[in-house]
Image (spheres, rainbow, N blue to C red):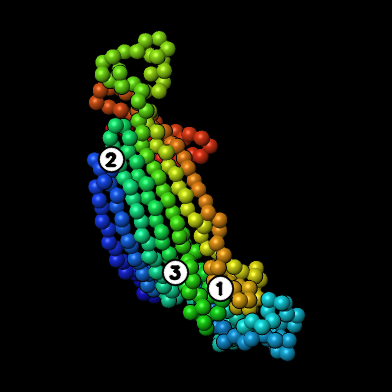
Amino acid sequence: MATSSSQQASAGAEYLIAKNLTLRADYLFVRGLKLPRTFNVNLLPPVVLTLGNASSLGVPDPTSQQIGREVFSPGRHDTRFDDIYQLQNSATSKYSGASLTLSRRMSSELEFSASYTLSKTFDDASDFDEQPQNPFNLPAEVAMSREHQQHRFVFNALWELPVGEEEDNGKKAEGNAARLTKIFSHIEVAPILTLESGRPVNPLTGLDSNQSHAFPLSARPLSLSRKLSEHTSTGDDGLPRLEVLPIRRSETSRRCSGILQLVQQGECVSD
């Protein structure tokens, strides 16, 4: 089996809006080739099921989702076996996306990045185990990918609270101010906000309505195309905190802890 590959093309430009503030625009096109997919290669071409031929096709009591659809007969190419599943590299995909990114470099204890991406992703198999509804009609499988996400917005920032700067300059606070300074000094807040549109899902009947013996199931309701439905949009936010604890003048240690009920995983490093 040949190795999967991709062809990519991209372009981008960056503009300096103001000191420490830039706006960048990017475009990316990716074409995936020879992607893996699974076939039942022992099936015979399907036949449109009617009440007259239902018994001969092995469907004695057809359902409403079977009448009028293409159904595979019990016959097989190789009669010694029922099903023969073969992993092939015949799937393809296409991604096209444009993004805008507004970035501010660290200045006055604050830096941030805000990025918005508008994209589309098409394929005819989103995973290696995804089987076509009809292996004899692969063009009908071309649709929005399960990985398609039309809108995505991500904002992240790093802000050092303006507490403890007096001690850094050789000044000492007294009383309650000293205690508050000791607690809140050298704290960096790093919020992360992600907003994204839902991903398409493959509408299925929940049954092997066309008798393809595909698993996972691949039979769709009549007149519905692959990846027609879409999940609702989602959002995620977190406020991980970095606290810098002085050990010696030349060394610091960083502690990571989550804020709110969302825990963001991060790495603690020692400089």
Q: Real-space Cα distance between discs 1 and 2?
A: 46 Å
Q: Residue at x 41, y 18 (%)?
A: 180
Question: Label 2 sits on what residue type?
Answer: Arg
Quadrant containing the C terminus in the rendered view: top left
Where 193 falls versus 87 (above or below)? above
Image x and y of residue 141, in percent: 50, 75
Image x and y of residue 232, in percent: 56, 56
Q: Element at badge 3?
A: strand
Q: Are marks 1 and 2 in contact (CB under 8 Å)?
A: no
Q: Real-space Cα distance between discs 3 and 1?
A: 13 Å
Where 18 falls versus 58 (above or below)? above
| Dot label at residue 99 | none
| Dot label at residue 105 | 2
Let me know if residue 189 appears in the view: yes
Residue under label 3: 122
Q: Quadrant of residue 257?
A: top left
Residue under label 1: 225
Q: Real-space Cα distance between discs 2 and 3?
A: 36 Å
Q: Earlier in the sequence, mark 3 or mark 1?
A: 3
Q: Earlier in the sequence, mark 1 or mark 2?
A: 2
Q: Earlier in the sequence, mark 2 or mark 3?
A: 2
Image x and y of residue 142, in percent: 48, 74
Badge 1, how many Cα within 10 Å: few under 14, some, many 20+?
A: some
Q: Residue furthest top?
A: 175
